[in-house]
Amino acid sequence: MVEYVEYKQEDVYEDVKKIVPEDFISTSIFERINNNTTPLAFDMERDKLPYLVVRPGSTKEVSGLMKYANSKRIPVFPRQQPCRSFEVLV
């Protein structure tokens, strides 16, 4: 099993905002529950939710996010939305 390092949500947010404009990053509990990877999100513990929901606007931003997450060993869960937007759960 892979072990992940714990990071403070605020630190990850500050790093990600250097890659993607702040308007496209959400720390909202609603967004984090709504975009969770489990169908029973209401049953999730708050600390098990994604740190952020990010909506990159270009391949450069996606690449930057993936490089950052890989360097920090932060799991990323890409999600395609019906309205053709692309989200990354960090």
Image (tube, grey):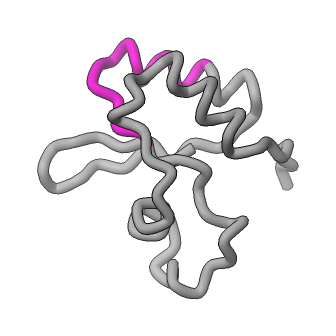
Q: Which residues are magenta?
A: 54-67
Number of callouts in the render?
0
Vertical side of 34 occupied by 86: above or below: above
Picture coordinates of residue 17, whole percent (x, y): 51, 25
**Residue at 29%, 19% in the rendered image:** 58
**Residue at 69%, 66% in the rendered image:** 48
Figure quadrant of residue 62: top left
Q: Is 59 inside the magenta-drawn segment? A: yes
Q: Name the quadrant of the C terminus.
A: top right
Q: Is 9 inside the magenta-drawn segment? A: no
**Left or right, residue 84 beside residue 64:** left
**Left or right, residue 22 beside residue 89:** left
**Left or right, residue 18 beside residue 82:** right
Figure quadrant of residue 10: top right
**Residue at 64%, 30% in the rendered image:** 69
**Left or right, residue 19 beside residue 67:** left
Vertical side of 13 occupied by 39: above or below: below
Q: Residue furthest left?
A: 83
Q: Name the quadrant of the N terminus.
A: bottom right
Q: Nearer the viewer, residue 21 or 38?
A: 21
**Residue at 75%, 28% in the rendered image:** 72
Vertical side of 44 occupied by 63: above or below: above
Q: Nearer the viewer, residue 3 or 46?
A: 46
Picture coordinates of residue 60, whole percent (x, y): 38, 12
